[in-house]
Image (cartoon, rainbow, N blue to C red):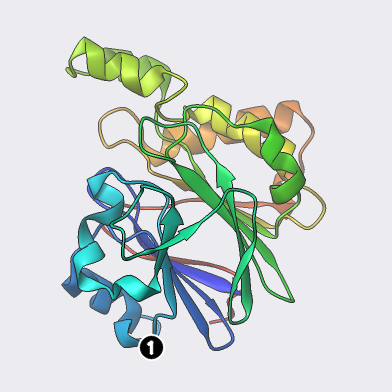
């Protein structure tokens, strides 16, 4: 199993996950042109998508829903229009080769969630847009091969932005977004012997940089004696694709 992230951030989010002949789209907050362009980068077409799973009902995650067949769209109750298929927290469902388990997140949206995706060879966690990491999720997401996790902001940079105070309070709240440090501590709990790759998602363009996020991770991991030579840590980007997972180019 491998993934190809097409966009990650407040301007739009979309990730393709591939296992053998199974192709899953996580979120569709981009244009159809960008979806087609991004899938072409790995030799795929939008018509090959078996299912699209959605994390929540904010526009940067679902504005491109109109380009997809509703019968192929899955989300928690009240997240998407009624014609889409409803799934339940912590109840796995299967799309061909991939087992998918929705897990709870904490965000100011209708029934937000993340997902654990598994095939016969590997396990992946996808979790963005959450103000806190819910430890009850550990039984479902512990020790994945690779992790896509939000690392949205640096707290000091967030406080220095020109954003309205209410927006700052929202971002910093438990229903907002994970800061770099909280993201790193969550990963310390989630990762295990099989974890090889961590991808930092949804970085704020105003209150974060890849360098700041990676430094926070490295500092915290070193404090907890994590061997950084054995873990690949990469920042996903808003405007450029990133391929990861068990993909051999």
Q: Nearer the viewer, residue 233 or 82?
A: 82
> At which x and y percent is residue 79?
36, 49
| Element marked by disc 1 | loop
Specify the farthest residue to the front. Answer: 82
> Which residue does the image show at 47% across and 37% down from the upper left?
151
Q: Quadrant of residue 162?
A: top left
Question: Can residue 70 be seen here?
Answer: yes
> Which residue does the image show at 52% across and 48% down from the upper left?
114
Q: Is residue 38 above or below residue 59?
A: below
Quarter of the rendering occupied by the N terminus:
bottom right
> Which residue does the image show at 25% across and 19% down from the upper left?
167
Q: Nearer the viewer, residue 47 or 78?
A: 78
Q: Is residue 43 above or below residue 26?
A: below
Q: Is residue 62 above or below residue 85?
A: above
> At which x and y percent is residue 35?
26, 72
Left/right of residue 39 with respect to residue 99 in the rendered view:
left
> At which x and y percent is residue 246?
63, 72
Query: To which residue does mark 1 refer?
Result: 43
> At which x and y percent is residue 86?
45, 59
Q: Residues within 10 Å of mark 1 (few under 14, many from 20)?
A: few
Left/right of residue 54 with respect to residue 38 in the rendered view:
right
Q: Nearer the viewer, residue 210 or 135?
A: 135
Left/right of residue 170 with respect to residue 249 in the rendered view:
left
């Amino acid at each position: 199993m491998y993934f190809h992230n097409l966009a990650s951030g407040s301007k739009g989010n979309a990730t393709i996950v591939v296992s053998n002949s199974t192709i899953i789209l996580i979120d569709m907050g981009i244009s159809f042109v960008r979806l087609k362009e991004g899938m072409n980068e790995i030799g795929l077409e939008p018509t090959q998508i078996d299912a699209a799973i959605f994390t929540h009902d904010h526009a940067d995650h679902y504005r491109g829903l109109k380009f997809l067949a509703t019968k192929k769209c899955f989300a928690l109750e009240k997240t998407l229009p009624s014609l889409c298929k409803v799934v339940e927290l912590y109840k796995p469902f299967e799309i061909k080769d991939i087992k998918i388990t929705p897990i709870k997140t904490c965000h100011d949206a209708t029934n937000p969630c993340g997902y654990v995706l598994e095939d016969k060879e590997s396990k992946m966690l996808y979790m963005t847009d959450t103000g806190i990491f819910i430890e009850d999720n550990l039984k479902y997401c512990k020790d994945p091969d690779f992790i896509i996790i939000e690392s949205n902001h640096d707290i000091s940079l967030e406080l220095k932005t020109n954003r309205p105070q209410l927006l700052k309070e929202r971002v910093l709240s438990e229903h907002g977004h994970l800061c770099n440090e909280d993201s790193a501590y969550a990963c310390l709990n989630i990762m295990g012997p099989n974890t090889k790759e961590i991808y930092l998602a949804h970085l704020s363009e105003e209150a974060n940089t890849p360098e700041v996020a990676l430094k926070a991770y490295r500092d915290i991991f070193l404090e907890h004696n994590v061997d950084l030579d054995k873990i690949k840590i990469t920042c996903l980007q808003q405007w450029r694709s990133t391929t990861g997972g068990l993909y051999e180019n």
